[in-house]
Image: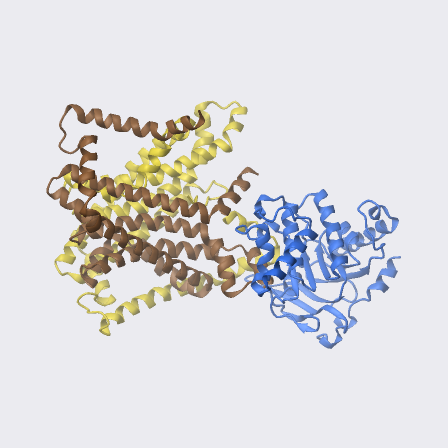
Chain colours: A brown, B blue, C yellow
Amino acid sequence: MKTLKNLGYLLGLPVILILIWWAATLETENFFVPTPASLVETFAEVWFGERIFTDVLPSIGRLAVGVLVAIVIGVVGGVLIGSVRWLRALLEPTLEFFRAIPPPVLVPVLMLLMGITDTMKVVVIISGCIWPVLLNTIEGVRAVDPVLSDSAHTYGVDGWARVRYLVLPSASPQIMAGVRQSMSLGLILMVISEMFASSSGLGFAIVQFQRSFSIPEMWSGIVVLGLLGVGMSFIFQWAERNILRWYHGQKEVENAA
Amino acid sequence: MQPDPTQAAPEAMLSVRGLKKVYQTDGGDVEAVRNLTFDLRAGELACLVGPSGSGKTTLLKCISGLMAPTEGEVLLSGKRVSGPPKKMAVVFQEYGRSLFPWMRVRDNVELPLKNQGVPRAERDRLVDEALEAVGLSHVPRSYPWQLSGGMQQRVAIARAIAYQPEVLLMDEPFAAVDAQTRADLEDLIRTVWKKLGITILFVTHDIDESVYLGERVIILSSSPTVIQEDIAIDLPEERDQLETRSLPRFTELRHHVYEQIQLAKKGDRPAAAGTPSAGPTPAAASGADVA
Amino acid sequence: MSSKTLASGAAAPSVERQHRQVRKMPTKQLLGLAGILGFLLTWELIPRLGLVDPNYLPPASEVIAALIVDFGLTAFWVAVGETMKAWFLGLLMAVAAAVVLGFIIGSSNFLRKATNSTIEFLRPIPSVALIPLAVLMFGVKIESSLLLIVYAAFWQVLIQVLYGVADVDMVANNTARTYGLGRMARIRYVVFPTTLPYLMTGVRLAAAVALVLAITAELVIGSPGLGREIALAQSGGAISGMYALVLATGLIGVLINMLMRFIEKKTLSWHTSVRSEVFV
């Protein structure tokens, strides 16, 4: 009974929305909006074939590499900068400025510097995604509890052990918040680097469909991007649940008190 | 005039010599600790009590090597303390902030040993013994924040014990737990102290607690801090929350410490203040004064 | 997080820490300035020493000179105006829609549960996926920018408002009810003040996202604004001009951040603790 109710909550609204869509496209032929059935049909036709290997997987690969490299550089750099007081004071205003630059403008800049290559697209993703992780890590490292830090110090937990057992876990809530921002930025940058400067990839394919007025195909591409976003969000939530289990537990206890 | 480090009694485990700490601030220098000199023999349990704002925490930070004194020095077994020494463990008041919330109880206790490179079997034995000693053998898989305040402080104590220190510093460890838990934890400290024979310096603002726990009570003046008085507690070795606290002698000692603290608050300073050559008052002698 | 650090234990060391910060303030700002100058110097040297072709990366001095020239041009300010117009309208529409929906959904347990799956599915869809649709429907008009901006900014605000309204439930609503406050009074005195800090966080995040999408739309679709100017400068070979415009977008980003923090501080000055972001 309970699971049935939860299932209702889960699927109720989506089903209603799809029914409305279906009903709305039933009567009049709308040029911009395909019917649900034709969208599903096109989706299977367009994406379950060669395109997976020529467009989808390469895009995902560039995205994954870019985001991961950005996270690694951001965390390592953030720990370093956050631990050294003068370095932080020296770099923070400059880094804040870099964070404030809307990352999409990097596409024309890097296109100019590197040409239109796969590496360029990965570098676009890296250089746009790095800032939230880097600045959040700096902030998290700075905010390590002084009592906890003293405790670690008195027990001789210094150097690398301090980073491993104190600094990184302590900063992990902020780091994860940065990672979340980076992941959605990464997806945006992947798409527009392909729309702007490419001859393959998801972004390129979708723009091609739009230019040739293949409307159901274009919508199916939008759906692919949507699924990619949802998939990334699931991966993130799974990772976050595991990494920050202690943090959410602690918050719950604090809120209950 | 600086006290000569060689003045430290040869058998002293912990020796604080002419310690002075001045904080530099915008509004000028603030002298938190003016001049402190005292020795702790190996295996002694001494309580450090003083009015609030008497620089107790500052003193403890200097002793534990977390902060460098402006003048004077701290010696541990005759060696000058310049950073947190291996032979020393500290239990802080803020139990909620001194344990790693991302580690389970057992990992918290184990971490310092792991970091020292203690072999696994040895480590397991020490952690088991320590958890057993504080009565927490049943919760090794819990996270600290899942436990009550008193139990969290027990974990911190277990971590200190497992580390096998020669000197244990405790900074108002029970100030933030409820009265009943507090009584239990006081008895736990006495038990652990007797069993392990370690030297304990217990900082508190609670007069009852200092008299009940200590073999000796060092009373601090108000800031800038000097030693107001150093008395021996001649209560029976076996202490009991009800029996000991109802002894006439307990009331007398408590009364005396209370008076001294009131004097300290009014700014009344002992004659010896500022003249380190007077050295530490022999504990037994000043204890006799009270009697 | 921050509340923990505030409840510092010992008086003396925390006093010391505060004072040290106060004293270091000018030093800190000087260091920050030195960092910016150091960055500009490095940038100046890289093309001058031939590490990168100056045709592709002109020295900092040239770019800054180009930016100063831009400051005197009407066309530049028109482009800035277009970008800011799209940013402001988009943000306004997103916030209005998110606040209304957020309060309606948040105040009903049934609606919150029923919409959860849909929100969690729609929220991660990247708004740039809508670019082809925007082009088909609106071409290079400002509506294209608005579609992307509103979609991206809306979720940021909605999520925070939902958190805020959920927070009310736990804290004060019952208290207010026991004192006999009616529905409107509860919304006025309890729900709204409790939600406001969350709302402001959402608006601040949305403001940053809105700028990113405004520039994106101009860059990719070609709707009027700084983004389009950047694309034009790049394809037209006006390289210093392009870098100058990139700097300008950064400056706008910094100004928007400062403005948002200022507004947040002003609106929440009555609030005992300006809340830290919810990490979700």
What x and y, as percent, mark residue C256? 32, 49
Q: Residue at x 13, y 28 (%)?
A: A29
Figure quadrant of residue A224: top left
As displayed, is residue A142 above or below residue C147?
below
The one nearer the camera, B235 or A203, is: A203
Q: Is residue C34 visible?
A: yes
- Residue A170 spot, x, y in % from top left: 49, 54
Establish if A46 lies above or below B56. Answer: above
- Determine which quarter of the picture holds residue B59: bottom right
For residue A25, side relative to residue B260 (left or right): left
User: From this viewpoint, is residue A219 visible?
Assistant: no
Q: Position of residue C137 (x, y in %)?
A: 15, 37
- Direction from residue C214 to residue B267 in the image, left or right: right
Q: Assign the C terminus of chain A to one quadrant of the image.
A: top right
Residue at 79% of width from left, 55% of height from top?
A: B260
In front here: B248 or A3? A3
Q: Is residue A49 left or right of residue B82?
A: left
